[in-house]
Amino acid sequence: MSSSRTRLDVLLSEAARGDRVALARLLSVVERGGEPSRSLAGLAYRYEPPYTVGLTGAPGAGKSTLTNRLITSARKGWPESGRDPEPVAQAAVLAVDPSSPFSGGAILGDRVRMQDHATDPSVFIRSMATRGHLGGLALAVPDALRVLGAAGFPLVLVETVGVGQMEVEVAAAADSTVVVVTPGWGDSMQANKAGLLEVADVFVINKADRPGAREARRDLEQMLDMSHPGSWRPPVVETVASTGEGVDHLWAEVSRHRAHLRTSNDLGRRRRDRAAHVLRRVVTAVVLDQVRLVADGEAFARCVREVDAGSLDPYTAAERLLGDGSAWGGTGPWHPGGA
Amino acid sequence: MSSSRTRLDVLLSEAARGDRVALARLLSVVERGGEPSRSLAGLAYRYEPPYTVGLTGAPGAGKSTLTNRLITSARKGWPESGRDPEPVAQAAVLAVDPSSPFSGGAILGDRVRMQDHATDPSVFIRSMATRGHLGGLALAVPDALRVLGAAGFPLVLVETVGVGQMEVEVAAAADSTVVVVTPGWGDSMQANKAGLLEVADVFVINKADRPGAREARRDLEQMLDMSHPGSWRPPVVETVASTGEGVDHLWAEVSRHRAHLRTSNDLGRRRRDRAAHVLRRVVTAVVLDQVRLVADGEAFARCVREVDAGSLDPYTAAERLLGDGSAWGGTGPWHPGGA
């Protein structure tokens, strides 16, 4: 373990010096999970996390094209930081598709998707899948973000495909979350409108040159009139990603949101909430993993036979299998909910 | 606890003597969860479980009407047991709606739904919800079935509303699972066809007097041609629940399935699998409950602050919060998946 940690330390130094192969290998370590990824987390969490912008929205909304354009705008720097903003030295894109079994190996696909930046050494693009990562993408992505932070990236865009619970959760774990819709979006995302409203810091109506853009905006503004939590009202930006129209404006709004987070101290609060969320996830994942081990054991099989035979009820069996829980951070004997 | 157990013992004896009020109170204990429901499980799991028939299908397929009719057929007895089958002395219906916060209190609703049996003392009808039950309906329903078994019911029909994952899981935990479709069902249940195919022991095309019944049957038979697991091919029965047409035939097929389970010894295997499934669920639920306790504690808050400050990674934090797992049925120190 300590030798693997030394090896990871070396890879991390190389990645921080701009070695993309080293960085790619580190992200594969995250994806594969297990002991090496935990050792890597032990190193990576020491560094400042990058500023993360999450993009989510229904498939076909043009997120990849938009992300591609957004990098160009982002590289010019944060507009709110003055007339001549300092350029962002390097940026990374994590493309996350929970439904896909493929991952970082899909380099060609990545290059095609983000062709404007394929040859730009200061832009790093990577697809992510889970493979064996304990806790799945919901933990692999935060870990990957910390690795990118440790490698010196000040900015990461996280693009998720789809608007399922997992995709929205991943995008919502960003500092600024951009929800991408298109004219006529209402029908396709009916079921998830409330969830998207809750996580959006900025709304984008992409393909805004198509009919229905005005109605989409009216829809969104009405929803926002009814309920936007806190002091930040998510702006609604119109873009045409295929031509780049509106993308600088979108970046300016993301930048304005970042400035708001900083001045309101919401950034610190968000990051603490996120740390709590990640820790809760890790604890749950570790524990469920343990349940799998318990359920594979001979003691479990014995209990099943007894429950089946009517000589034991499942609650008493669980109590017997789990012990009295005294090793559980001193919370004492377990007492299930509702008791 | 032992006095509450004595009280439960008394209620159970009363319920077994036909006291419906006592039985209703016991099922409320199950719904509310907590310590009393665990004590009740300790009593109820000693008895033979009832034979359970699960009915699931999309809302609007006519499941309530069908269930109502099916009780009438069922009360005549199991056809495969001879020319003059012995009548089933009493039967219960559990109507389960995971999306509804309401429960057993909705007696009027139950009576309206099952009006043919509202005044029949040998038919017991009950809606179920979860309230506080640890593990939700997936555990409350098995517990309720055991309570009904302990109260002397040889047969319980479990009707679930909807074809979501939970509904299908609950219905699939029956001895015989009936999947109810209607002509034109293919469109409405596209997403879940494979899942329904997997759990169905008997298919019913209800409202078979409507156009499209023949196509629905052809659809189902084609699906079954391609894949039906094991030695039992689910029959496809046509019914018109509103008139009662075909319902005796449906009951005969359920009865034939029961006979198949008994002669093939699949009933024992199924029940053992189910005991294992319930036990896994209980262990998971207990443990997740414990996670909630851990996450509410001061040690957790301290770890969050350290993770946020960069002095601790979440995996090391989880290890610290959970101890070394040695109280976990002797499986030794935890080692997460993929390691």
Image (cartoon, coloured by chain):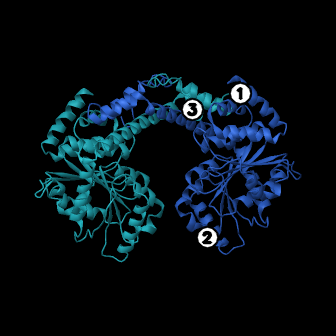
Chain colours: A cyan, B blue
Type of amino acid at the residue the image marks with label 1:
Ser
Asked if the residue at tag 1 contacts the one at tag 3, i.e. Cβ–Cβ closer than 8 Å, the answer is no
A279 horizontally vs B220: left or right: left
Quadrant location, the C terminus of chain B: top left
A115 or A46, which is in the foreground?
A46
Q: Which residue, as the protein is rendered here, is positioned at the far bottom?
A: A211
Image spot of residue A333 (x, y percent): 53, 24
Q: Which residue, as the protein is rendered here, is positioned at the far right?
A: B84
- Residue that numbered label 1 is attached to: B4
- Residue that numbered label 3 is attached to: A336
Type of amino acid at the residue the image marks with label 2:
Gly
Q: Secondary structure at mark 1?
A: helix
Eye-nearest disc, 2 or 3: 3
Asked if the residue at tag 3 contacts the one at tag 2, i.e. Cβ–Cβ closer than 8 Å, the answer is no
Q: CA distance from mark 2 to mark 1?
A: 52 Å
Locate residue B264: give its quadrant: top right
Image spot of residue A162 (x, y percent): 39, 59
Circle 3 chain = A
Both marks 2 and 1 on one chain: yes
A22 horizontally vs B68: left or right: left
Query: Height in image: A309 above or below A32?
Result: above
Both marks 3 and 1 on one chain: no
Asked if the residue at tag 1 contacts the one at tag 2, i.e. Cβ–Cβ closer than 8 Å, the answer is no
Question: Which residue occupies 37% across, 38% down?
Answer: A276
Q: Which mark is residue B184?
A: 2
Eye-nearest disc, 2 or 1: 1
Image spot of residue A67 (x, y percent): 26, 60
Locate residue A83: give its quadrant: bottom left
Type of amino acid at the residue the image marks with label 3:
Pro
Circle 1 chain = B
